[in-house]
Amino acid sequence: MKWKSKKRKDAELRVAGWDALPSVDLLFSDKDAHTLRALRAQKPIPLDQRFSVDDVKDLQKAIHGTVVLPTDLTYHRDRQMTLLAVQEFPQLIVFCEIFEDARRCLEFAQKYDLRVTIRSGGHSTAGFSVNSGMLIDTSRIKHVVVDPKEKRAIVGAGATIGDLNAALKMYNLHVPSGGCGDVCIAGYMQGGGYGFTARKFGMNCDNVHEIVVMLADRTIVVANSEKNADLFWAVRGGTGGNFGILLQVTYNLHELGDVWGFGLRWSIDSRDGIKNAAAALAEMQANYMQTGAPPELGFMTFLAWQDETPCVVMRGMYLGPQRDGEFAIDSLRRLGPVYTDFGVGRYADLDLKLIESPPGLPQVPDLAREEKQCGYIDKKLDAEDWAHIIGVFLTSPNRSSLVCIEPYGGRINEIPATSNAFIHRKVDMNLFLDVFWMSEDQQRKDAIAFLDRFMAMMAPYFNDHSYQNYPRRTQQDFRRRYWGSSFERLLAVKLKYDKNSFFQYAQSVSRETPETHYDLPQLPEGIETEPY
């Protein structure tokens, strides 16, 4: 009798249904009427002529993960990113569960000449984590192994910030992380990785001890400060999907006990309110970013509507006793805000509470479309400048628009700009505008027009750089804006580890034109690979 493993049986069940396209009505509820209309208008996605269903069946049988085709019931859910404004339809999606799955995917893609995109969490703000070819998804490679003695964590590329925080919480250990718990660490780290504790401990990428990457030739490399150090430098800030498939990150951890959370809010629905809020914003920049406030104070500030009222909202935490935190924000409390004490607790709990608890950020409607753009500010703005910015924000076409200010300073600014590919060290803040809309008609036009108008107004205040973790498809001169004078070094690493540019997308590390000349630095010869 021939026995079959459960994995083989599951694979056979999956491939059995790959000959009929399901109705999209089974996949989406009526409340997502726009998506349903769009998908009903779509013709069935024909399988690429370069490979057959039998070829895909062989791939499914060879991996531990799951292959998803357009004929699968879960296809439209599985292809979707957080950014609903971008709709792409891959020929196939592969959810990898072990490192070897990624190797099998690359073999398949190279055999059939398929364009590949790598996705961990799918939170690219420009929709770069999906394409129309082969989508390799690493979200199931999500192990988190903590060594409390060495203060290290070995983390799979698909582990979310929520997964990581939950694992570290029991050991009173920490690595800087963002406020969105379902963002995966691979994309987050490779673009920098900002969070409430970054002023104390640096960006997420500054806390990486070692990485594991699969290159285009299907070899695996380990990179750290001693082995493949040029790749180690590049991946930390060079953004995802450029050099290979990031499989694993090892972090250096920090001890962190209870923290104190707080909120300050200034209404901006009157002339006096705008005046007070503008004074508060000027005070924040002058004394709570590069200079003044201790690095233990981390915060974010928002311009948003709450309960029908436009406001400037500061949400933050202090990594120490509450009395010290209250003293640190004393000058801001004197400017007349509504004060909220979120109490003392663990970082993972307060991080979520500060962002999501009412009266927090505006509640954006479900299934809203989104676009954002950001810029760095390193020049001092006075209260009059901030009042002008508030005034333009108040002309938003809807009440879902959101400005976010992420303050720098502290450890972020202490680290040399050349220590890794994240160069944005001598700035006061990153500022971005997020716009939202529900329908792809006038609402979208109005939202995008407002985003463009707001960014044009901000241009004199911004420097020449932008945070690479918040890309926009229309961003001009992205190479200089994301990486500045480090771009040539980054390109040299790209040409060494991915010489044929197998991994590429609209804003990947690349020459501006094939003829563009760059003065590339000389890198150490050779790549040290692993025997697995």
Image (cartoon, rainbow, N blue to C red):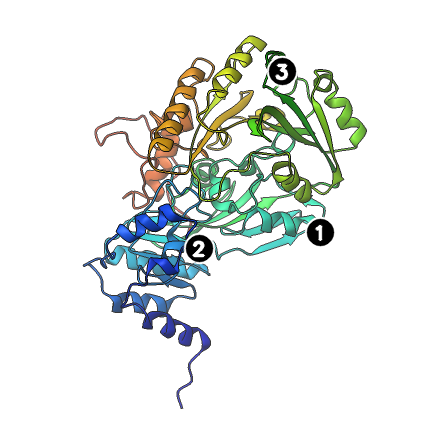
Q: Residues within 10 Å of mark 1 (few under 14, many from 20)?
A: few
Q: Is residue 219 visible?
A: no
Of marks 2 and 1, the one in the foreground: 1
At x 59% / y 19%, what residue is drawn?
268
The amino acid sitting under disc 1 is Met
Q: Position of residue 203 (x, y in %)?
A: 56, 34
Q: Which residue is mark 2?
A: 530
Q: CA distance from mark 2 to mark 1?
A: 33 Å
Q: Position of residue 473 (x, y in %)?
A: 35, 33
Towards the viewer: 108 or 420: 108
Which residue is at the far bottom? Answer: 1
Q: Which residue is mark 1?
A: 170
Left or right: residue 99 versus residue 107 is right
**336 is higher (above) or lower (below) than 514:** above
At x 39% / y 87%, what residue is drawn?
2
Q: Which residue is mark 3?
A: 273
**Res. 447 mark:** none
At x 72% / y 16%, what residue is drawn?
331
Mark 3 or mark 2, earlier in chain: 3
**Disc 3 secondary structure class:** helix
The amino acid sitting under disc 2 is Glu
Q: Position of residue 72 (x, y in %)?
A: 35, 63
The amino acid sitting under disc 3 is Gly
**Disc 2 secondary structure class:** loop
